Amino acid sequence: MPNVKIVNLIKRFVSARGEDLLALDRLNLDIPDRKYSTLLGPSGCGKTTLLRIIAGLLEPTSGQILFDNMDVSGKMTQERDIGFVFQNFSIFPHMDVWHNAAYGPVVRGWSQAEIAKTVERNLKLVGLEKRDKALPHELSGGMNQRLGLARALAGHSSLLLLDEPLSALDAKIGAFLRYELKKIAKTNHLTAIHVTHNQEEAMTISDNIILMRKGEIVQTGTPEALYDQPNSMFAANFIGKCNFFKARKKSSHSVEIDGKMLQLPNEVSQDKIVIGIRPEKIHLDPHPDQIRFSGRIELINFLGHLYEYRINVESDIVSAYKRIKGKNLKQKYHEGDVIEFSFSGEDVFVFPEPEDFKKELSLG
């Protein structure tokens, strides 16, 4: 427990110039119980504002926050029974690890036996049981973040809120802690809500992703659903990479792209559309029965397990991946080469063409 429900939530701020700023625009959302959910989106989209309203650190302009169908909108933070992990750790520098982890239970007036049992359990859970006498400045950034997690868990709260908890850590420690956070949440049967702007982090850690943009919810679902079935150009471009081609309807199941015909499995309803295709679905050895394009390779990026080819097609850049097989790193293609590539209508996304194509491609 709990299930968190957001109903018609609006949040407005007044700027220093007296301007009315709409941060959250009539959000309606169900966050499932005992699942690890992420609020994902670009900076300024409203995800941290939403998390702080759920925590009781901000008041909504209007709307409701429900925990298990109970309206908590008017309750103070300490009355909501939550654990909160901050981006900047928020550790007391003058207290050792043990006393930092014990702070919540001490404030709540627990017995010494309950406090000791809880602290021992949580420090073991985050791997700090042998550093219980260390001061925060003696710990690494990753250890301090784990200490912040231990302190958030100390109150036995069933709802864990995390505000970009990994953004201040280096890449390897952050990647390690992703798995630790999810494992701890699952072990403790917690409902977790994790704010991030990092789509790789969200894809790795989430049971459920809530994608936001400009104060609105764009799409929710599993990482697989958002990657394989994006509902908009923005979702396709923010979750992973995607190439886009403007197209025109020619028949119920075919479109034209730059004079070339592409057959689609599903019926096309609009005259002007955009075709989206993932880089891994582009074939650099063209298939004879697929739509074909040609372009010049401008850049090749080596990504360890694959090469990324950036191909200039009539001044538009198309990204294609080619997986490295075995230990053979020898490249068939080189920068400056003019090559052909192809893709299948079975692998594309179809979106209505927006009024401002370039603006829709922006990740803001």
Image (spheres, rainbow, N blue to C red):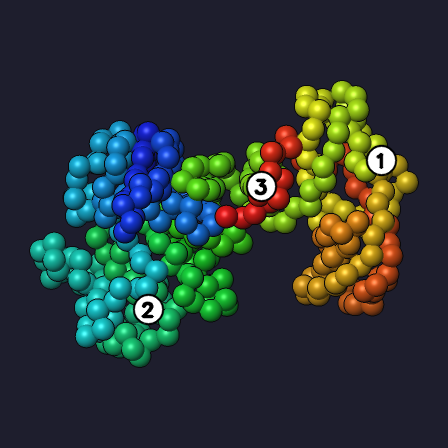
Residue topped by disc 2: 144
Q: Residue furthest bottom?
A: 138
Residue mark closest to the camera, 1 vs 3: 3
Image quarter where the N terminus lies is top left
Q: Using the rendered view, name the quadrant where residue 254 is placed.
A: top right
Residue 41: percent from the left, percent from the top? 47, 47
Residue topped by disc 1: 260
Q: Is residue 199 visible?
A: yes
**Crowding near the residue tagged with mark 1, few <14, some 14–19, many ≥20 C-alpha atoms within 10 Å:** few
Q: Distance between the residues labelled 2 and 3?
A: 39 Å
Does residue 133 appear to the left or right of 342 in the view shown? left
| x 29%, y 77%: residue | 137
Residue mark closest to the camera, 1 vs 2: 1
Callout 2 touching callout 3 (CB < 8 Å): no
Say if 133 sits above or below 263 in the image.
Answer: below
Does label 1 or label 3 sit earlier along the sequence? Answer: 1
Q: Which mark is residue 114?
A: none
Residue mark closest to the camera, 2 vs 3: 3
Residue topped by disc 3: 360
Q: Using the rendered view, name the quadrant where residue 151 is placed.
A: bottom left
Q: Can residue 236 be seen in this view?
A: no
Q: Which of 57 and 4 is in front in this view?
A: 57
Secondary structure, mark 2, is helix
Say if 256 sits above or below 238 in the image.
Answer: above
Secondary structure, mark 3, is helix
